[in-house]
Image (cartoon, helix red, strand yellow):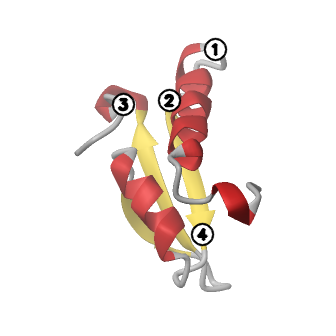
Amino acid sequence: MLKRSVWGRGYALEISKALIEYAFHVLRLSQVVVETVPQNTPTKKVIEKLGMRKEGATPEGLEFWSVEKSAYSGLTE
C-alpha cells in the first residue's frame, strides 16, 4: 500500500507493471489475476491501463480481472 501523499504520481502503475512482468518472465506464469472492490475506481483505472480485462465477480462481491501472457504487451493508452 502506498502512502496517500504519493497517490496519483504513477507509482502504482509502475509497480504493477513490474510485478506482472516478473510473474510472466521470472515465474513463467501464463496468467495474472487480480481482485478489487468495485468502488475502488483509481485501482480499476490502473488495472485497465495494464490491459487487464474484467472477468467477473466473486461471491463476496470482489471484481476479478486477468491478463494472459500471450495478450500482455505492457501499458495500454
What amino acid does circle 2 point to? Ser
Return the residue at label 2.
Answer: 30
**Disc with the residue nearer the chain's start (3 vs 2):** 2
Q: Earlier in the sequence, mark 2 or mark 4?
A: 2
For badge 1, the amino acid type reads Val
Give the quadrant of residue 16: top right
Q: Reading the chain from its start, which is encountered first: label 1 or label 4?
A: 1
Image vertical order of residue 72 relative to residue 48, above or below = above
Above or below residue 16? Residue 55 is: below
| Three-letter residue code for mark 4 | Thr
Q: Specify the quadrant that holds the C terminus.
A: top left
Q: Which residue is mark 3?
A: 74
Residue wearing tag 1 = 26
- Residue occupied by mark 4: 36
**Cα distance, mark 1 to mark 4?**
25 Å
In the displayed structure image, the side of residue 22 where residue 17 appears, left or right: left
Crowd class of label 4 (few under 14; some 14 to 19; many from 20; radius 10 Å): some
- Upstream in the sequence, badge 3 or badge 1? 1
- The residue shown at (57%, 28%) is 18
Of 46 and 33, which appears nearest the observer? 46
Q: Indicate the position of residue 66 as horizontal and vertical percent values.
A: 46, 51
